[in-house]
Amino acid sequence: MARSQPEPVQQVKKRRDAALNALVSGVPYIQFLGITFDRRGDELTGVMPFDEKLIGNPLLPALHGGATAAFLEVTAIIGLSWSMLWDDIESGALEALAGSDAPLPKLPKTIDFTLDYLRSGLPRDAYARAHVTRSGRRYASVHVSAWQDNKARPIAQASGHFVMPRRDG
Amino acid sequence: MTPDKAKRAAQFIEAVPHAKALGMKLVKFGDGEAEFTMGYDIRFIGDPETGVIHGGAVSALMDMCCGTAALSHPDNPGGTATIDLRIDYMRPATPGQTITAKAECYHITRSVAFVRGRAMDGDPDNPVATATGTFSVEAK
């Protein structure tokens, strides 16, 4: 039996990047905070470039705990949506994510979010990665951690529970 | 707390860049209690389909309000920083409505302030979110 040709790499990247862009660019608050996502295969890293408006303590100066909290929550929700949609992105089933006008799939909703502040956030770029510990049909549990210069020295970590959107067509 | 001291505290707190960016207003400050409002703004939307504010913006308001309550406690000599914060989201905030957060520091030791808070929209009997947190107590 003849094997089908693998998809050209540019096409694969284009499809995945279009899906990620559709997911992220539609949320005003992500734009407001200036958060972007760096993609390597299916791995996402949230990037929150330093900005004056993220400061909470002008004397130190340090990032506001609320900015860090929002960054972690955004990374958790996008990371969870991304893993939920991955199979449909790969199969091409998600037209909405490929740049058409079809509505975007609904996002998971936060039930609770628990943050540990480990170090003060310095006035520089921050990075975060989410790990979906469990993703069921109705609920999901996600862990996320953020760092700046040194990944082994996280500034904050969080874990949260989410209600998954109904996906019955 | 004298009205003058509360006024100075309000000026200082509202000048925090992130609080300013989110349009937070300090309504009450003193004796371990704080109250803030945050007006609806389309830039803070988390769900473009419904126009509901992002949970992260509510978290930022809660962190600010709980931290300010810790700061306002008479036994807190100096600054404070969040140690941990848990937020429970009961329901989406109604689009278009101002969110009010209230927090109280119900216990304080030499090193830790224990705070709880809640966030309401136009329906105060039905909170949007609740928060529990611990904050550091720092010497002046």
Image: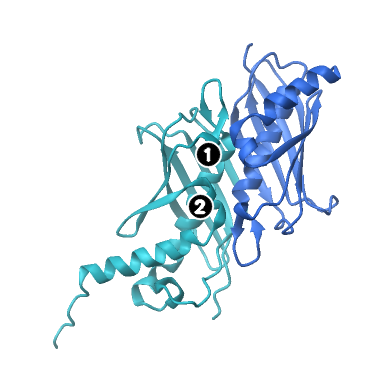
Who comes first in sequence, dot 1 or dot 2? 2
Q: Height in image: B30 above or below A83?
A: above
Q: Residue at x 64, y 42 (%)?
A: B22
**Residue sticking out furthest to the top:** B140
Name the kind of residue labelled 2 in the image: Gln
Tag on residue A34?
none
Between residues A81 and A98, which one lies in front from this camera angle? Answer: A98
Write down the residue under mark 2: A31
Q: Is residue B127 left or right of residue B48?
A: right
**Chain A, hue in figure:** cyan
Between residues A92 and B131, which one lies in front from this camera angle? Answer: A92
Where is residue B82 shown, x and y percent of the image? 60, 30
Where is residue A54 shown, x and y percent of the image? 53, 36
Q: Residue at x 50, y 78 (%)?
A: A102
Q: Secondary structure at mark 1?
A: helix
Write down the residue under mark 1: A68
Q: Height in image: B104 above or below A34?
A: above
Where is residue B49 shown, x and y percent of the image? 61, 67
Mark 1 or 2: the one toward you: 2
